[in-house]
């Protein structure tokens, strides 16, 4: 079999662990129109090596788009084009860390960020979270013992927990970063995917946020295959990124793709697409929430998210998600176990479910299978001699 995408779900399986957009929501027609318009205008500059910080016209269009949605000023000079959030995070590690340095992460955190940090030879120290996100008191205690190269956080509709950090904690986090002189790398890829109340402003727009590197991407709001995103930060922090050897050799990242997306931004098509995603994902979130409450009832614990992609579900006391996963797969449903998201070997009873990849009917079917699997798993445990 010749594979073309990262997704590889076996036939008959509903994999609620897939944390990606539904293929049916990828806007082929929109991008076809953008490409036709851009390729017809006669400008060949976007086929050459790009400007290191990213095409100026694209960044102006992106700044205008972000200003509308953030309701805060965003300067094109504060934006840098990237090849998505993962590449941006790797470049930040290149420019601001050395092997053996320590980075702070939330417990739990985005599991593939842990992979990037491991690739760079970085040590990870975990900061606990609660129902309001990062525990800033615990962070302050940890800072008395060590200073990180940076703190990596997903402050809005957190992956995997779905929690959003309140404005007051954001302000205190930034105050601590200034006091203890560490960077904050804010992975804010779900900022625009809210389905009820708007979240607090992204960290890069807070007063006194000169040491914040805010990461954004079109992967969640347009299409992951574009491999296009941005870093929003102060000019002083942009300088080492823009002047890196990678960009000196290869030029700015994704000049061709950003030229197409510039059209999408300038025409207001992305605003329309984001509104469609908000409506679609909001419906799917509600479906998963209702299905979990109906199918798993009091057996599990979870907080209902207000945006993003994910539910973070806690199994009954004494159960481990990794062991339960075998039973779930026999019932043709899958998820991601919590241990993947732990930098400290914890989160054993947790599992992450995604509502973005499947439609309402499949979400309902998947959660019903999950409930059947949990009944089976608990029955087997009760009947097994200890």
Image (cartoon, rainbow, N blue to C red):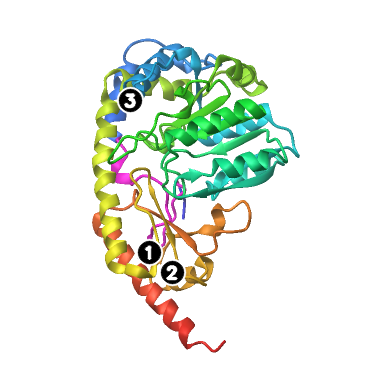
Mark 3 highlights which residue?
A: 69
Q: Quadrant of residue 194?
A: top left
Bin the neighbour count of mark 3 within 10 Å (Cα to Cα): few under 14, some 14-19, many 20 and up. few
CA–CA distance between discs 3 and 1? 37 Å
Whole-percent x, y for residue 32 in the image = 30, 28
Bin the neighbour count of mark 1 within 10 Å (Cα to Cα): few under 14, some 14-19, many 20 and up. some
For the residues bearing labels 1 and 2, Cβ distance under 8 angstroms: yes
Can you say whether 346 is above or below 94 in the image? below
Task: Mark 3 or mark 2: name the one nearer the start of the chain.
Answer: 3
Q: Secondary structure at mark 2?
A: helix
Question: Of the residues tagged 3 and 2, which is closer to the observer?
Answer: 3
Comparing 252 with 233, the one in front is: 233
Residue 114 seen in the current view: yes
Can you say whether 56 is above or below 3 in the image? above
Q: Quadrant of the C terminus?
A: bottom right
Whole-percent x, y for residue 379 in the image = 42, 82
For the point 33% across and 11% down, which residue is it?
41
378 magenta-colored: no
For the point 39% across and 20% down, which residue is it?
62
Task: Mark 1 or mark 2: name the one nearer the start of the chain.
Answer: 1
Mark 2 highlights which residue?
A: 329
* Left/right of residue 217 with respect to residue 275 in the rendered view: right
Question: Of the residues tagged 1 and 2, which is closer to the observer?
Answer: 2
Mark 1 highlights which residue?
A: 13
Q: Secondary structure at mark 1?
A: loop
* Left/right of residue 241 with respect to residue 169 in the rendered view: right
CA–CA distance between discs 1 and 2? 8 Å
Can you say whether 126 is above or below 324 in the image? above
């Amino acid at each position: 079999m010749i594979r073309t995408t990262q997704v590889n779900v076996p036939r008959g399986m509903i994999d609620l662990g897939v944390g990606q957009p539904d293929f049916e929501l990828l806007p082929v027609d929109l991008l076809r129109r953008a490409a036709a318009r851009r390729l017809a205008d006669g400008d060949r500059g976007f086929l050459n090596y790009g400007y290191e910080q990213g095409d100026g016209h694209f960044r102006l269009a992106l700044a205008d788009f972000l200003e509308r949605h953030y309701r805060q000023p965003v300067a094109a000079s504060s934006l840098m084009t990237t090849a998505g959030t993962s590449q941006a995070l790797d470049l930040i590690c290149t420019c601001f860390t050395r092997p053996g340095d320590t980075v702070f992460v939330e417990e739990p955190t985005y599991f593939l960020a842990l992979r990037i940090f491991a690739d760079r030879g970085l040590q990870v120290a975990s900061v606990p979270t609660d129902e309001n996100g990062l525990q800033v008191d615990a962070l302050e205690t940890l800072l008395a013992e060590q200073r990180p190269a940076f703190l990596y956080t997903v402050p809005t509709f957190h992956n995997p927990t779905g929690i959003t950090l309140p404005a007051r904690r954001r302000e205190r986090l930034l105050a601590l970063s200034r006091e203890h002189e560490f960077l904050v790398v804010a992975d804010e890829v779900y900022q625009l995917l809210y389905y009820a109340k708007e979240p607090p402003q992204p960290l890069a727009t807070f007063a006194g946020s000169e040491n914040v590197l805010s990461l954004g991407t079109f992967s969640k709001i347009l299409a992951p295959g574009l491999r296009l995103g941005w870093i929003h930060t102060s000019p002083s922090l942009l300088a080492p990124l823009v002047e890196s050897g990678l960009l000196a050799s290869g030029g700015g990242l994704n000049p061709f793709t950003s030229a197409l997306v510039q059209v999408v931004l300038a025409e207001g098509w992305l605003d329309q697409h984001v509104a469609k995603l908000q409506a679609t994902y909001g419906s799917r979130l509600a479906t998963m929430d209702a299905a979990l409450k109906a199918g798993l009832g009091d057996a599990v614990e979870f907080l209902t998210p207000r945006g993003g992609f994910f539910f973070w579900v806690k199994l009954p006391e004494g159960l481990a998600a990794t062991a339960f996963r075998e039973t779930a797969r026999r019932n043709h449903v899958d998820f991601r176990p919590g241990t993947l998201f732990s930098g400290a070997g914890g989160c054993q009873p947790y599992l992450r479910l995604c509502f973005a990849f499947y439609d309402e009917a499949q979400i309902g079917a998947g959660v019903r299978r999950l409930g059947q699997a949990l009944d089976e798993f608990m029955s087997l445990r009760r009947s097994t001699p200890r």
